[in-house]
Amino acid sequence: MSDEQTVGRKSSGRRMAHAGRRIGSAARVTGRGLGRAARSRPTRRIGVALAVVAVSLAGVVIGLLLGARVDVDIGPFRAEMSVTPAVDGGTTVAIPPLGSLHVDSHQGPVQLSIQLGSLDQVRTLALLDDPYAITRASQTVVGDVTDGVLRLGIRTIAVAVLTTLILAALVFRDTRRVAWSGTLALLIAGGSIGVAALTIRPDAIEEPRYEGLLVNAPAVVGDVQQIANDYNRYAEQLQHIVTNVSRIYTTVSTLPVYEAAEGSTRVLHVSDMHLNPTGWPMIRTVVEQFDIDLVIDTGDMTDWGSEPEATYVASIAQLDVPYVFIRGNHDSIRTQEAVAGQPNAIVLDNEITTVAGLTIAGIGDPRFTPDKQTSPADGGLSRPVAEQVIGVGEQLAATVRGSAEPVDIALVHDPVSAGPLSGTTPLVLAGHTHNREVRELAQVPGEQSTLLMVEGSTGGAGLRGLEGEEPTPLAMSVLYFDAEQRLQAHDDIQVGGTGQAQVTLERHVIAGPVEPDPVDPSATPTPDPADPEADPGSPVPGPPAPSPS
C-alpha cells in the first residue's frame, strides 16, 4: 500500500469519528429535550395537585382519629363525644357495660359517638334533693347535647386542619403547598360536618338498634314512647310528690301515738329501690321523723348491677344511722362492694351481726338476673331455680342454729328462701315481689313461731313501675322492737306510685308471742277415722297461730 492510500484511510477514519461524536451529541440534546417535554408544567401541576389531595385526606383522617373528641356534661352524666370517619353516618350511644344503641340520625362521611361515663355525684345529689331539678335537667339535656356537638364540630375542623398543616410541612417543605393542603383540609372537614348537619333526622331516635345487654331494653321497659310520656308526667308532678311526703307528718300527728316501751328500737325496712331517685328523700324523711335507729334493706337496690349504677348507693352515707344490706337478684357483687364501702353500711352474706341491740342474720340472693328472667311467665320457679333459692334459706338457717346467741331477725331477698328459717328466729324480712305481705310461716312443732314480713318496692319498681296503668306505689315499713328485741308493732307507709301524690300510713300492733306447743314424745297421734287418707304416723297439727292485726 502506498503512502497516499495510508494517509487517506486515516483521514477517512477521523471524519467518521468526528461524525459519530456529532451524532452522539445530537442524541443527548434530543434526550434532554424529550425529558424537558416530559416534565412540562401541566404534568407537574397535576402531580402536585394529587399529592396535595392525598396529604389533605390523610391529615383529616389522622386528625379525626387522634383528636376529634370532647368531654361534655349531659344531665348528671359525664360523657365523651367523638367523630370518626364512616360511610353511612349515624350516631352510636355507648353505655358501658350494658351495651350500645345505634340511631340512623344523619347521612355523610362521619359518625357521631357518645359514651356515657360516671354519674357526677354533686349533680346527682342535686337531682335527689331538689324537687325541681329533674324538670330543669330534662329541659337542659337537649341544650347539653347541642352545645357538645357544636364544640365537637369546631374542634374536629381545627384538629383536622392543624394535623394536615403539620403533615404537609413534613412532606412538601413548601409554604404554598402547605397552605393549599390546609385549605383543602378545611373544605373536607367542614363539608363533611355540613353534610351531616343538613341530613339530620330528628325522628330517628324513635327507631334505635340495640346491642349487648341493651337488646333486652325494649322488653324490659316496654314501649319507649309510652314510658317517655309517663316519665314526663312524673317529672311534672314530682314536686307534688315531694310536697306530699310532708303529709306523712300530718298523718302521723293524727294517729294515736304508739307508746313504745323504754329502750325500744325503731327499724326502717326498705327493699327493691331499683334506682328510683325519689326513694332516698323518702327514706331520709322517715329516718328523721320517726327517729329511726337502723335501716334494713333486703336487696334490689339497682337494676343491672353495673358500675355506673354503683354511684346510686352514695346516698347511704347521708343517713346518720346504720344501714344493713343483703344482695338482691338485680344486685351484682360490684353493687354489694359499693354498699360495703359506705361508712355506715353493713353487708351480710350468710353472716350474723348485732346492730342497735338487735342480732341480725342475712344472706344475699343466689341469682344475678338483671334481665328479669328469674321465673317463667306463670310466676312459678323452675325446679333447679327453686332448689337454689330454697338452698340459701337452708344455709342461713344452719348459720342461725349454730349461733351462740339467739337471732332476732333473718334477712332474705326472695320470700321463697324463708321457709327453712321457720322456728329459727321470730322474724324474717324479705322483698322481691313488690307486694307487701305479712304472714306466719308454717310452724315447726316444738319451736317458736316465725313471722314473715315481705316489703313492697321502696322505689316503686323503678322505671318498670311506669309500665302499667297504675304506677307501683313506694312502700316501706317502720318496725318497733321492745327492750327484749320482740316486735311490738309496725307502721306501713305507702306513697302513691311515680306520678301520684297520695300518702297513707297504717299501724299494726302485733299480738303476743306464740309459744311452741309442748311435744310429748310418748304421745301417739290419733288419725281422723273419717279421713281414709290420714297417715297414722303423722302428727296432728296444732291450732293455727294468731295473725297480726
Image (spheres, rainbow, N blue to C red):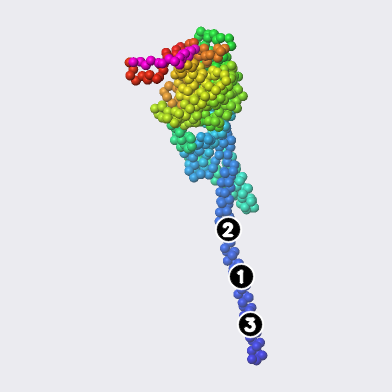
The amino acid type, in three-letter code, at marker 1 is Arg
The residue positioned 61% from the left and 50% from the top of the image is 168
The amino acid type, in three-letter code, at marker 3 is Gly
Q: Which residue is mark 1?
A: 28
**CA–CA distance in space, label 2 to label 1:** 23 Å
The residue positioned 58% from the left and 66% from the top of the image is 34
Estimate the x, y position of residue 462 in percent, counting from the top left. 49, 25
The residue positioned 44% from the left and 13% from the top of the image is 545
Estimate the x, y position of residue 102 in percent, counting from the top left. 48, 38
Q: Which residue is mark 2?
A: 44
Badge 2 or badge 3: first in the primary sequence: 3
Q: Which residue is mark 3?
A: 13
Which SS class for mark 1?
A: helix
Quadrant in the picture for residue 3: bottom right
Estimate the x, y position of residue 44 in percent, counting from the top left. 58, 58
**CA–CA distance in space, label 3 to label 1:** 23 Å
Task: Tell me which segment is drawn in magenta.
Answer: 513-529
